[in-house]
Image: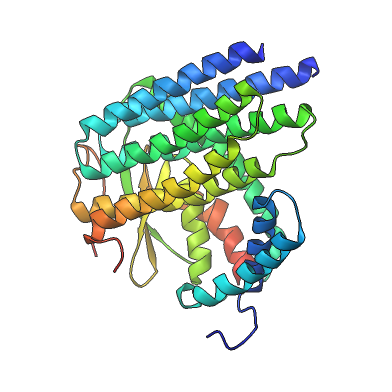
Amino acid sequence: MSALTEYTITALLLIGGAFTLVGAIGLARLPDFYTRLHGPTKATTLGVGAIILASVVYFSFQGEGIGITEILITAFLFLTAPISANIMAKAAMHLGVDVMDGTRGSPWEQ
Amino acid sequence: MFDRLNFPQPWLSVTLFVVWQFLSNDISGASVVMGLILAWLIPQLTQGFWPERPTLSRPWRMPGYLLRVLVDIVVASITVARLILSGRTPKPVFVSYPLELEQPMAITILASTISLTPGTVSADVSDDQRILLIHTLDASNEQDVIDAIKQRYEKPLLEMFQ
Amino acid sequence: MIGIALNITIGMVVLATLLNVYRLIKGPDAPDRVLALDTLYINAIALIILLGITLGTRLYLEAALLIAVMGFVGTVAMAKYLKRGSVIE
């Protein structure tokens, strides 16, 4: 494995870990449900995406070929993340979850 | 429902077949037969749930659009990460976004794009499919959000789907 | 060098998982708990992939794929239950 590959894998791993952690900090720190929705659904998806990319690079340089399963996991995560965010937002609006002070506009229920 | 051997959703069938080959790790006779059965059966069973087939007029623009979305995800993730780490209180706002797109599939793609780019989540579509409710994490002006989405995502989708 | 980066990354993801558990316990509302569970399964996928790199095997990726599929179905089922009071109508 060349030095460049090692640097790439190291960078991807650290970026992935950092985004996952930032998403979780957002989940723990932000004040209401709707703002919390932003932290994990996206930052985490990108974080896991970077970690999966690191895995693809690592195993392809072990001489095991490009991993199809990794690509399927990434595609699946990116397809499902907006759907689960949307359906959770709908459930929260239905239950009338509190919004933080200073939010402009309001959720509607139909 | 089962009396015809047809493929009402050809692209769905192709996708299902290819994904099944990926899942079975190596392509063999058995996986091809099973893939063909699934590619025929699943569209038949889910026929009633699909909206009208969208009319894609410029499908070759799709890769460019996906690439732009990918770049935006990375850029916007960094913005959201900085907001979370800075510790200041965000200024969230619910934006009612007037939709120009009319086809259900196009609206789904737009809503998913909005949800995937950090900082905005599409929360609901009105019953008449004219207004999209978007929760924005940190914005000082509603009109800026609407203009940005219209310019970056809805215009290309309008060109692709009409 | 990859070994050190792996350990640091595993540490960060474990810390993220603990923060998710904090949100899962604290709530305060049911959707917050569903959101915490949703994030937990995504972090579990990350941990399994990191374990796979550490052990140098790709065997665990199948498990990660299964968690991705089942976690999504679980999130949708729970959110739908909160919204409608039943999962299958």
At x 39%, y 69%, the residue is B129
Q: Position of residue B48 (x, y in %)?
A: 46, 78
Q: Residue furthest bottom?
A: B3
Q: Where is B107 relative to B78, above or below?
A: below
Q: Position of residue A67 (x, y in %)?
A: 70, 40
Left or right placement of residue B109 versus residue C54 in this view: left
At x 46%, y 37%, the residue is C42
Q: Nearer the viewer, residue A62 or B98?
A: A62
Count the labels in the image. 0
Q: Is residue B144 visible?
A: no
What colour scheme was applied to this rendering of the protein? rainbow
Left or right placement of residue B24 versus residue A107 in this view: right
Q: Is residue B115 visible?
A: yes
At x 50%, y 38%, the residue is A45
Q: Where is A45 relative to A90, above or below?
A: above
Q: Where is A20 relative to B101, above or below?
A: above
Q: Nearer the viewer, residue C86 or C83?
A: C86
Q: Position of residue A92 (x, y in %)?
A: 25, 50
Q: Residue furthest front?
A: B30
Q: Where is A48 relative to B28, above or below?
A: above
Q: Quadrant of the N terminus of chain A?
A: top right
Q: Quadrant of the C terminus of chain A?
A: bottom left
Q: Nearer the viewer, residue B101 or A93?
A: A93
Left or right placement of residue C40 versus residue C52 in this view: left
At x 30%, y 51%, the residue is C78
Q: Position of residue B118 (x, y in %)?
A: 46, 40
